Amino acid sequence: MELSRRGLMKLGGGTAAGLAFGNTGLPAAAGALSLPASPSFDLHDDVTALFMHQKAWCAPVMQCAGYDHLNKHWYVTQVMYIPADGVTQTTRTYQGDLCVTKLSADGTTKLGRMYLMGFGHGAQFGIEATAAGQPPYLWIEYDSVPSSAGVGAGVKLCRIRYMGPPTDQPARHFRWDNAQDRADMNFLDRTPDPLQLPGAGATLSAPRPVVDPLNRRLLVRFTRNGQRQAAVWDLATAVAAPLGAPLVLRENLPKEETLAQGFCCYGSYMYQLEGKGYAKIPRDPADEGTTYITKIDLNSSATERVFTRALKSLDYREPEGMNIMLVPDPANAGAYLPRLTFGFASGLPGDRRVNIAYKDALI
């Protein structure tokens, strides 16, 4: 650990690997659609540990974390598991039952939790902040279907209001197929219509969302025509009506070489996180883990894949989820600066912890 130019702890770093940022031979965004060109995060920037070793409400590994910048709260998804209710973690995973924990800005205090029954796995979700003093909306998968490995995952996409009671009040369970629960959550189905997308393909699967909070856009990643694709919509338009024609569609996204662990969007760029979990010190101390971040220009075929040793001191280290965090701009009152955040699960089985790191240098 060392004191950085921002006066914060720096842990780990980034090393270029795989493709340099440039043309990969993949097709550009379909239909000549494009987004306004924006800066992108420098993947070779130092990594800052925002917080480490904090607890979410349940014991399983975190799946993803997102930040409500207007209220300074974190929201963490994980498989729901409450030993006292007599339902095993295996059953919860199979059913797609989730817990969303509300945490303080520094991760030290559990402020609330919301149980989402039959929604999916929660490996990626988006936070839509609304106003100070008001709960955010979560963009998340729903209608869970178990895989052959016994892991439930949503086959549709929705927008719901966070409705978790404070930790000192009884928990509440929300079902996507219950009329009263849907009304209370202001439930909106926002599963993309493949017939509204450029190109061929009448079906799509595994839609997963993320919100770009600064540019107010929604990105949904899915599989279509056997390809990994991503489409972007204006957020206000996506809230007002079912998803129609997107601002941009990116076909044939590069697939993770190890294990997909999350993604996010800022401006005209998408970022993907990958890597496998491991315990204790890796066998080769010069090569800690398999965590990579890939940057994708949504307007072209340019990609860059960078290896990171972020938070390499963790006893158990598994990359989990990405999102964009906004923080006040000290040089511009009322404005915000973006951070590229990504999580790691740590700790022992039955006592996993939440860790959040970020990069913030733009190029």
Image (cartoon, rainbow, N blue to C red):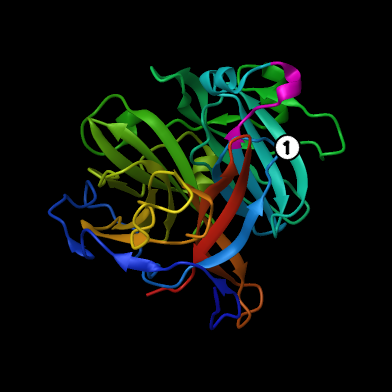
**What residue is drawn where x is 60% and y is 75%?**
8
Quarter of the N terminus within the rendering: bottom right
The residue that mark 1 highlights is 113
Magenta span covers which residues? 78-86
Asked whether the viewer can see residue 47, the reply is yes
Vertical comparison of 285 with 5: above or below: above
Quarter of the C terminus within the rendering: bottom left
Q: Is residue 196 magenta?
A: no
Residue 342 appears left or right of 246 = right
The one of 12 and 214 positioned closer to us in this rendering: 12
Residue 19: image location, x then y, percent: 20, 60
Residue 265 lies in quadrant = bottom left
- The three-letter amino acid code for the residue at tag 1 is Arg
**What residue is drawn where x is 87% and y is 38%?**
168
Residue 163 appears left or right of 246 = right
**What residue is drawn where x is 71% and y is 38%?**
57
Residue 237: image location, x then y, percent: 50, 45
The one of 304 and 224 positioned closer to us in this rendering: 304
Report the label total.
Answer: 1
Residue 34 lies in quadrant = bottom left
The one of 232 and 90 positioned closer to us in this rendering: 90
Label 1 CA crowd tier, 10 Å (few <14, some 14–19, many 20+): many
Q: Is residue 82 magenta?
A: yes
Residue 302 appears left or right of 291 = left
Vertical comparison of 211 with 85: above or below: below
Residue 208: image location, x then y, percent: 44, 37
Extreme residue in the front direction: 283
Residue 157: image location, x then y, percent: 49, 31
Secondary element at tag 1 = strand
**What residue is drawn where x is 66% and y is 73%?**
334
Asked whether the viewer can see residue 214, the reply is no
The one of 352 and 189 positioned closer to us in this rendering: 352
